[in-house]
Amino acid sequence: MNGIYLSPEGKALIESKIAELETELTLPYEYKVIAKGIIKTLEQILSDATVLPVEESWEAVDESTNTIPKVYPHGLIIQPKQ
C-alpha cells in the first residue's frame, strides 16, 4: 500500500483500535476470526504508512532557506488554528 499518510494522532488512534480488538480475541470463534483479520489489516496499514510531522504554523517552517523538501521529504501537517 503506497500513499498512506498519517498524523501522529491518526497512528495512535489505529494503535488503540488494535489494542481494543485484541481484547475481543477471547470472544467466540467467529468474532475472533473477524477481529484477527481487522488487526492484520490495521497492522499492515501502520507498517506501510508514513507518519507526517506536525508544525504549529507556517512560521515554524523556515521557507526562506528552501529546506522544506530536505527537512520534510514526505510533507508535513500544519496544525489548524483552533
Image (tube, rainbow, N blue to C red):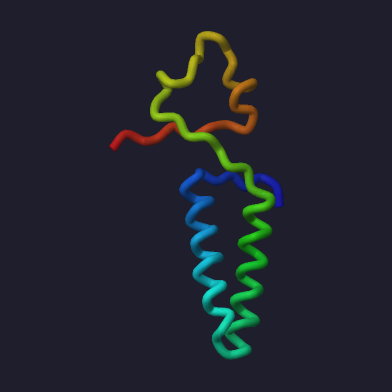
Tag count: 0
- Name which residue lies at 61% across and 70% down: 38
Residue drawn at 49 percent across, 15 percent down: 62
Viewed as shown, does residue 75 lie left or right of 55? right
Pinpoint residue 19: horizontal percent, then vertical percent.
Answer: 53, 66
Q: Residue at x 51, y 9 (%)?
A: 64
Q: Is residue 8 left or right of residue 2?
A: left
Q: Quarter of the image holding residue 42?
A: bottom right
State whether residue 22 is above or below residue 44.
below
Name of the residue lying farthest toward the left: 82
Give residue 60's position: percent from left, percent from top: 43, 21
Residue 44: horizontal and vertical position, in percent?
68, 58
* Residue at point 58%, 90% (across, down): 28
Q: Quadrant of the C terminus?
A: top left
Depicted 33 relative to depicted 70: above or below: below
Find the residue positioned furthest to the bottom: 28
Q: Is residue 8 above or below residue 73?
A: below
| Residue nearer the viewer, 50 or 18 | 18
Q: Along the horizontal axis of the image, is 1 left or right of 68?
A: right
Q: Give the residue at the far right of this rendering.
A: 1
* Nearest to the observer: residue 69 or residue 17: 17
How far across and how far down the image is residue 46, in percent? Answer: 63, 53
**23 over 2 or under it: above or below:** below
